[in-house]
Amino acid sequence: MPTMIANALPDIPRLYTAICEWLACLTYIAVIHRRVPLQRTVGVGAVGLVAMIAIQYLDGAMPIWFWVGGMLLAFAGMYAIVGFGAGTGKREGLYIAARAFVLAELVASLHWQIVTFLHVQTDPLDAMRFQWESWTALVVIYGACFGLAWLAERDNFDSTAPTTTTTTIQLAVGTTAITLVTFAMSNLSFLSTNTPFSGTVGQEVFYIRTLVDFCGFAILYAQQQQARRLEASAELTSINAQLESQHQEYLASKENLESIGRLAHDLKHQIAALRAEVDPQHAAAGFEQLERSVAEYSVQQHSGNPVLDVILTTKTRTCTERGITLTAVADGKLLDGMSSMDIASLFGNALDNAIEATSRLPDRQQRLIRLALYRQGGFVVIRVENYFDSTLRKDAAGNLRTTKRDSTRHGFGVKSIRHIAAQYGGEVTIRTDDHWFVLTVLLPR
């Protein structure tokens, strides 16, 4: 039974391995959410390349028994590059480093397999030509492979938010297991050829290694894609639940307003009858005051859209209770064709966010909210403005980040508005102008 590899190929040069591992780290830093300045990323990248080269040559100078330790040291270097270069958390950095490690193993094995195959077919004794061919192939293959990896992974990660999700622990555990199995199987032939999964010929060994590494990368890619789908599904479920909640709030408000309107109408008749029977001056003044109070309570918004009327009336009363001045100028007829649930959710979320932010202002003179609904060109414009005195936090996509501590359970208000606008082919923009928070929704007519 053979114990040695026949026609063994030369080992991959340490310099090539270091460059490959370094480029794998940069590829994933380019697709994930980076939370540090670009200057820091560039600096970490420059230092990281030197460090990876040093680690590889240190491993080469150590005895063979240090081989596993050397691989762990290389992985630690990749983990440091990802962590410091992108500002990831510990678990997120471990996950990304593992993905980069498998990608580096795949690209390095593929490059060396192709180089050695082409060299054997030409002139295996020409060392200078071999060096030239290997470096040329390195530039071409590394550039193509890491470019393709970037194209494939950029839609598999969110560049505006950390990779940490509710399934991070499962991802980390699963990725660690897959990475270890992939590495062990791809390098098994170098440890022993006396296994059913080992190769005995040099080119065959690298073929097995490349194939196993590719399978490991494909599995990790599919795992991340599935995690992204689950995360998007959970977010959509939360948004839909909030839409339903807003609609139920609208239905309850509508029923309450109808009851109040009937009560106010009856009270007006009762007051008129009492005035005809009792005519003391002070009683008349009291009845007039009562009439004004009832009239004030029975005032409702009339925008031309019954759903918007209910939302504006309800939110106006909420604002009055909190000492907020709400000014609304709206042509509700422009919302014809939009479902009642979408109208209630869109305006309800926008006004709720404005009311919550404005309520925190200590100066009541600054508690101002303005709403406008009008037509401009071929668009329906919805603009909600409120005064604020804090700094807004946005991600790279312009999405507003919640100021609440429990960010996993909040922040869906603006997402819900964006979701509704997208359904009608519209867009949402958020900007600030001299302490005014301005949310604008453009809907094509």
Image (cartoon, rainbow, N blue to C red):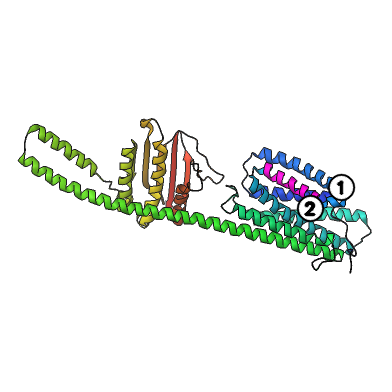
Q: Can you identify the residue that label 2 sits on?
A: 139
Residue at (27% x, 50% y) in the render: 256
Q: Is residue 256 visible?
A: yes
Q: Residue at x 66, y 51 (%)?
A: 95
- Residue 423 image label: none
Residue at 64% over, 42% down: 87
Q: Of the two numbered discs 1 and 2 on the same chain, state the one appearing first in sequence.
A: 1
- Residue 417, given in percent of the width and then of the height, sits at 44, 50
Question: In the image, is residue 75 part of the stretch drawn in magenta?
Answer: yes
The picture quadrant where one finds residue 112 is bottom right
25 in relation to 2, above or below? above
Side of 269 where 209 appears, left or right: right
Mark 1 is on which residue type? Met
- Give the x, y percent position of residue 147: 70, 54
Residue 102, magenta (yes or no): no
Circle 1 crowding by C-alpha within 10 Å: few under 14, some 14–19, many from 20: few
If the image is split into quadrants, where does the C terminus sit? bottom left
Residue 343 in view in this figure: no
Indicate which disc residue 62 carries: 1
Q: Badge 2, how many Cα within 10 Å: few under 14, some, many 20+?
A: few
Residue 376 % position (x, y): 40, 47
| The residue stretch that appears in magenta | 68-84
Report whether 362 appears left or right of 2: left
Relative depth, front residue between 127 and 411: 411
